[in-house]
């Protein structure tokens, strides 16, 4: 996730761009940059670090101009640096582009352009876009066809892109226009008087206008000072009336959601698609190939596939992702897995075996205990694979291999989209290793991959029923004990569900492996207890049904989270919340969503601010 903006009008553009970027900084803050057309000259200024670093650099520079674009970055391809910051320019320095999204086929496009003598300066996926535009601007796609100007060049370049983009283009030869386009990343056009703007999000536009076009996928806008033209990505004109925005600035910053946490829960479908899609070859079968997993960013050398053991370590939510990983690696790849909390691992004199695979998981990549555990394993000669959300984080720099979760910045303290995207990375690794180790047949492998491709839509389906969870929370939020229970994958999800609830609602909540109930926890169950059973492992339905009877017989209220169409629990639980059917072993990607929503709505009912839970910090960088 990054923030992009652009302006064409009468005002001096630099302060306009910096003001808009400030409003977009929550979308990314590892670097920022602007490109401005000043007296026919395209000036680009960019800097690693927060927007303030760029603003500081611009102090004392006299940059005029009334047309420009800006970007605030959350690195995906290429670590945070001046050179990887946007805008990116073509070889002549006459065209500049800012981009939010992921170009999935950038490696192939880069090779194609390099074969045409294009020299790349950055490690970003975005740079291919500006070189493609320049290529089509200088040399029309069909021999004998006259150049069609900058719009035709952008249209031709877009045809080559796979993945997601919201982008803005300015060109020195066209000082009267700014071109913007979107697919699968947000982009809004603001309509002013004698001025027009674009931004990734509404708050950046509100000081100028409330009349907007919410660009739809595969639409382009050409902004002039006095009007805006809309097109399809086939170049056909679109006519529609603008929308009026009446949000206040604060709710606009949260995309209309009451809290960042709720917004991030809703972003999971997209975040999961972003994490999955670039790693699948031919997901639709359109290229006639068989679907497979490729990790462009890491080379899994053959010794990883023969590693005798996987060791996983992390803290908090990321540790729960590792718990899911234990079941996933054992199930798909038949590798023994050891999972440990990083603060335990670092002090317990673990047995370090260099041939093992060490996986470390951290949203921030800066958690002190997680880094210490990783360094210990490294000293012991183990090879480190990190799963993290932050490009350029300490973890990403020190690990041997890095698999990124493309979740975008997570603002709310309680982790949601980072967790599900961590799960996605784990599943991809476990499935790939399962295939390499020949524990999965071709048919099984493809079946699981096909199931993964359905997950983002299924997440939307779960979110579509959030009112049911909200109503349930409004009846149960006052319970003073909430226990989550499940078996196997469902136990791992129970751990995460209990953590979510306790950290934002301050309700005493715990998770139990359901089979452990009789060994102690059931002594706590009474009429003031809510028990949430997660039941997605079909072979264990009878067992979990008995556990539910045991707690309801002692007066507990009960909720079961299970598959759509599953009737086994209707007569024994107070409430059943169903999720769309996927493979039992992939269920955590879906079953955690109602639990996240439940925690959120309980916190709100209790009058807490879910985004800023008491005593907690987003990143625990000290012991
Ligand atoms: C819970 C939560 C924390 C973090 C933990 C590790 O919602 O956010 O438990 O998961 O502090 O943080 P990272 O993943 O940044 O290492």
Image (cartoon, helix red, strand yellow):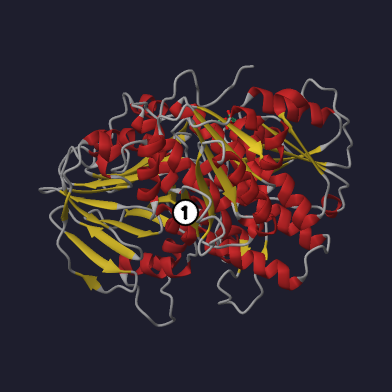
621 up-or-down from 184: above or below: above
* Quadrant position of the N terminus in the picture: top left
Q: Going by the picture, which residue comes out furthest to the bottom?
A: 144
Q: Quadrant of ligand 1?
A: top right
Q: Nearer the viewer, residue 155 or 283?
A: 283
Residue that carries the numbered disc 1 in the rendered image: 269
Instruction: Report x, y in % for residue 487.
Output: 68, 46
Residue 69: image quadrant is top left
Q: Does the rendering let one see residue 122?
A: no
Q: Residue at x 54, y 26 (%)?
A: 619
566 up-or-down from 403: above or below: below
Q: Residue at x 60, y 68 (%)?
A: 450
The answer to whether 281 appears left or right of 145 in the picture is right
Instruction: Report x, y in % for residue 548.
Output: 59, 45
Q: Residues within 10 Å of mark 1 (few under 14, many from 20)?
A: many
Instruction: Report x, y in % for residue 6.
Output: 29, 46
């Amino acid at each position: 996730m990054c923030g992009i903006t652009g302006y064409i009008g009468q005002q001096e553009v630099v302060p306009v761009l910096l003001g808009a970027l400030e409003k977009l900084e929550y979308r990314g803050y590892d670097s920022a940059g602007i490109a401005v057309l000043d007296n026919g000259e395209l000036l680009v200024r960019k800097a690693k670090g927060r927007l303030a670093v760029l603003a500081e650099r611009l102090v004392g520079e006299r940059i005029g101009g009334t047309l420009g674009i800006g970007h605030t970055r959350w690195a995906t391809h290429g670590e945070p640096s001046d050179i990887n910051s946007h805008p990116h320019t073509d070889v002549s320095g006459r065209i500049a582009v800012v981009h939010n999204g992921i170009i999935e086929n950038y490696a192939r496009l880069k090779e194609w352009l390099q074969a045409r003598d294009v020299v790349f300066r950055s490690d970003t996926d975005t740079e291919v876009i500006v070189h493609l535009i320049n290529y089509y601007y200088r040399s029309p796609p069909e021999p004998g066809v006259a150049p069609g100007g900058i719009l035709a060049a952008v249209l031709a370049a877009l045809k080559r892109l796979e993945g997601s983009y919201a982008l803005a283009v300015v060109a020195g030869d066209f000082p009267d226009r700014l071109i913007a386009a979107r697919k699968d990343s947000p982009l809004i056009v603001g309509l002013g008087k004698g001025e027009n703007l674009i931004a990734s999000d509404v708050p950046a536009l509100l000081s100028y206008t409330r009349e907007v076009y919410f660009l739809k996928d595969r639409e382009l806008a050409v902004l002039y000072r006095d009007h805006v033209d809309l097109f399809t990505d086939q170049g056909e004109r679109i006519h529609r009336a603008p929308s009026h925005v009446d949000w206040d600035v604060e709710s606009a910053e949260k995309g209309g959601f009451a809290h960042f946490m709720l917004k991030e829960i809703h972003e999971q479908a997209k975040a999961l698609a972003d994490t999955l899609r670039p790693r699948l070859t031919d997901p639709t079968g359109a290229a006639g190939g068989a679907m497979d997993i490729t990790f462009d960013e890491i080379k899994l050398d053959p010794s990883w596939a023969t590693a005798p053991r996987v060791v996983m370590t992390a803290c908090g939510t990321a540790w729960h992702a590792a718990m899911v990983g234990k079941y996933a690696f054992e199930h798909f790849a038949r590798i023994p897995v050891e999972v440990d909390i990083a603060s335990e691992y670092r002090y317990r004199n673990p047995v370090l075996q260099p041939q093992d695979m060490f996986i470390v998981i951290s949203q921030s990549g800066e958690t002190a205990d997680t880094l210490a555990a990783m360094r210990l394993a490294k000293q012991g000669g183990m090879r480190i694979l990190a799963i993290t959300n932050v490009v350029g984080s300490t973890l990403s720099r020190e690990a041997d291999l890095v698999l990124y979760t493309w979740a975008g910045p997570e603002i709310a303290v309680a982790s949601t989209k980072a967790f599900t995207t961590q799960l996605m990375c784990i599943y991809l690794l476990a499935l790939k290793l399962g295939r390499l180790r020949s524990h999965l047949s071709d048919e099984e492998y493809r079946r699981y991959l096909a199931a993964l491709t359905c997950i983002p839509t299924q997440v939307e389906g779960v979110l579509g029923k959030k009112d049911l969870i909200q109503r349930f929370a409004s009846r149960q939020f006052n319970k003073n004990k909430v226990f989550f229970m499940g078996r196997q994958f469902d136990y791992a999800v129970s751990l995460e569900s209990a953590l979510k609830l306790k950290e934002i609602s301050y309700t005493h909540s715990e998770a139990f492996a359901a089979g452990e109930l009789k060994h102690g926890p059931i002594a706590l169950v009474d009429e003031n207890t809510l028990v949430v059973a997660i039941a997605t492992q079909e072979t264990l339905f009878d067992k979990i049904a008995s556990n539910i009877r045991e707690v309801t017989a002692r007066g507990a209220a009960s909720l079961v989270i299970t598959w759509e169409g599953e009737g086994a629990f209707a007569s024994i639980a107070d409430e059943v919340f169903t999720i769309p059917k996927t493979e039992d072993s992939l269920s955590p990607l879906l079953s955690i969503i109602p639990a996240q929503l439940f925690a959120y709505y309980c916190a709100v009912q209790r009058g807490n601010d879910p985004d800023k839970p008491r005593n907690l910090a987003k990143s625990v960088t000290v012991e």
